[in-house]
Image (cartoon, helix red, strand yellow):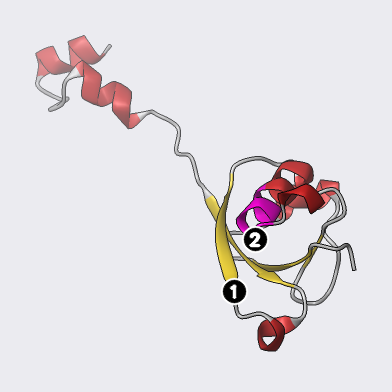
Amino acid sequence: MIYEARELGVAPWSESEACDAVDPIIFVLQLIIRQNGGLEKNKEEIKIELTSNSLKDLLKEICRAFGCKERYNKARLYTKKGVEIQKTDVEFLNDKDILYVAVNGN
């Protein structure tokens, strides 16, 4: 079909460019993570790209970045309003969301 359109002089691109034009767009969400307790307690924050919809994988990556990777199974993730993020909530996170992590689970 592209070949026929090129013969008619309609498509000014090559077949490879046409294939590139239909590649799916992949959005990578970036989350801002702060340790629980507010900026007065700890001013450190990290930016993490959400690569999986798994809460376990996300907590592993966060704990690794904060230097306490062995505590990921106790860690809890919260929104700005203090609502805990559950397994099914990860898919609803948005780009540039600010989340708080309690590495000790509290």
The residue located at (61%, 56%) in the rendering is 65
Residue 90 tag number: none
The magenta region covers 61-67
Judge from the rendering whether residue 63 lies leftward or rightward of residue 43; answer left or right. Answer: right
- Type of secondary structure dominating the magenta stretch: helix
Label 2 near label 1: C-beta < 8 Å?
Answer: yes
Report, in whole angstroms, how far the alpha carbon at label 1 lies from the one at label 2.
9 Å
Q: Which residue is mark 2?
A: 66
In this view, the residue in front, 67 or 11, is 67
* Residue 36, above or below 3: below
Percent coordinates x, y for residue 23 in the rendering: 39, 29
Percent coordinates x, y for residue 70 in the rendering: 77, 48
Mark 1 / mark 2, whichever is N-terminal:
1
In this view, the residue in front, 77 or 63, is 63
User: Tag 1: Cα neighbours inside 10 Å, few (<14), some, or many (≥20)?
Assistant: few
Q: Which residue is mark 1?
A: 44
Examine the image and state in which quarter residue 66 appears: bottom right
Please tell me whether mark 1 sits on a helix, a strand or a loop: loop
User: Tag 2: Cα neighbours inside 10 Å, few (<14), some, or many (≥20)?
Assistant: some
Judge from the rendering whether residue 50 lies leftward or rightward of residue 57; answer left or right. Answer: left
* Residue 43, above or below 18: below
Q: Quick check: is 63 in the magenta stretch? A: yes
Give the residue type that dot 1 points to.
Glu
